[in-house]
Image (tube, helix red, strand yellow):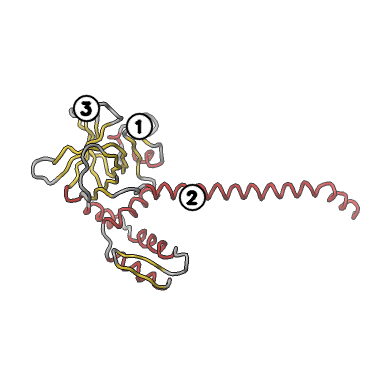
Amino acid sequence: MGVTSEAWWAVWWPWMVLWAATGVGLAALGTVALLQLVRARRAAVQDITDGICFYLHDSTVMDHYQMRRYTAALRKEVEQRTSDSKDGTVRAKVFGVGADGSRRENTEIVSRYLEVAEPISVIGVIMKVLEEKRVIVHVDLPSQTVARSTALLRTAADAQGSVRLRDIEGFVLIRGRFRTTGDGPAGDGSTVFLAPYGDPADPSRGPRVRVTCATEGLRNQVPQGTFSARCLGKVEEWNPEEGVLEVEAMAIFR
């Protein structure tokens, strides 16, 4: 019996080593692939608010934040930021107020952050949560494309064929080349922006997206001419006579 076992091991031990190495290699590849997927998703969420916050509709942002109960998400985000200090200390800056201390002070810092929460501080968290829940449909006007995603399947009536923007019921993040047309209807305190579908020679003709913003929500001076931006909002209605799609904006990033 001993001879048989020794003979068996003499024949099969190289294959056993090879199989074990193969298993370890496959496990390692799976781990690397999973990490890359997680990083890609995190990067996609982080990139969503890259750039300058050009416009915020403060009341809409705060109403949405409070209605959807994003306090827990905000608390988690702040805790993560204050816990990521490499030297073991917490360094946070809460709206201009510096805070240094040990990790035991995280609760105090988070509480202070939440007490002074403002639209500009919570819009990033709201967008991150919306993106993680896959309810934002990404639209690119210059290339006239809509990203095929879970969000599209959830919000569009027919996400398999050609998608009409006016059929999207959820949030849209529209990338386009916007230009101002001046003030809105007389005395209503609004500023109107237009962005064409595609890249026509004359942006004032053909189908366009029209975004009406509360002038008081503009955080920077309106640029002269055309500028690239991304608008987070909801589709309101299609005006076939003007060839204009009305979009209600929550935020615009340049």
Category of crowding for the residue at label 1, using alpha-carbon neighbours closer than 10 angstroms: few (below 14), some (14–19), many (at least 20): few
Quadrant assignment for the C terminus: top left
Q: Which residue is mark 3?
A: 205
Side (left or right) of 183 relative to 30: left
How much space separates mark 1 and mark 2, taking CA atoms? 28 Å
- Badge 2 marks a residue whose secondary structure is helix
Relative to 164, is 192 above or below? below
Q: Which residue is mark 1?
A: 143
Counting from the top left corner in percent of width and height, residue 146 is at: 36, 35
Relative to 16, is 92 above or below? below
Category of crowding for the residue at label 2, using alpha-carbon neighbours closer than 10 angstroms: few (below 14), some (14–19), many (at least 20): few
Q: Earlier in the sequence, mark 1 or mark 3?
A: 1
Side (left or right) of 1 relative to 181: right
Relative to 196, is 118 above or below? below
Quadrant assignment, res 69: bottom left
Foreground of the two, 27 or 191: 191
Residue type indicated by callout 1: Ser
Residue type indicated by callout 2: Val
- Badge 1 marks a residue whose secondary structure is loop
Residue type indicated by callout 3: Arg
Q: Earlier in the sequence, mark 3 or mark 2?
A: 2
Counting from the top left corner in percent of width and height, residue 145 is at: 36, 33
- Badge 3 marks a residue whose secondary structure is loop
Side (left or right) of 167 relative to 59: right
Side (left or right) of 184 relative to 232: left
Task: Say the numbered circle drawn on residue 38.
Answer: 2
Q: Are marks 3 and 2 in contact (CB under 8 Å)?
A: no
Quadrant assignment, res 116: bottom left
Residue at image coords 55%, 46%: 33
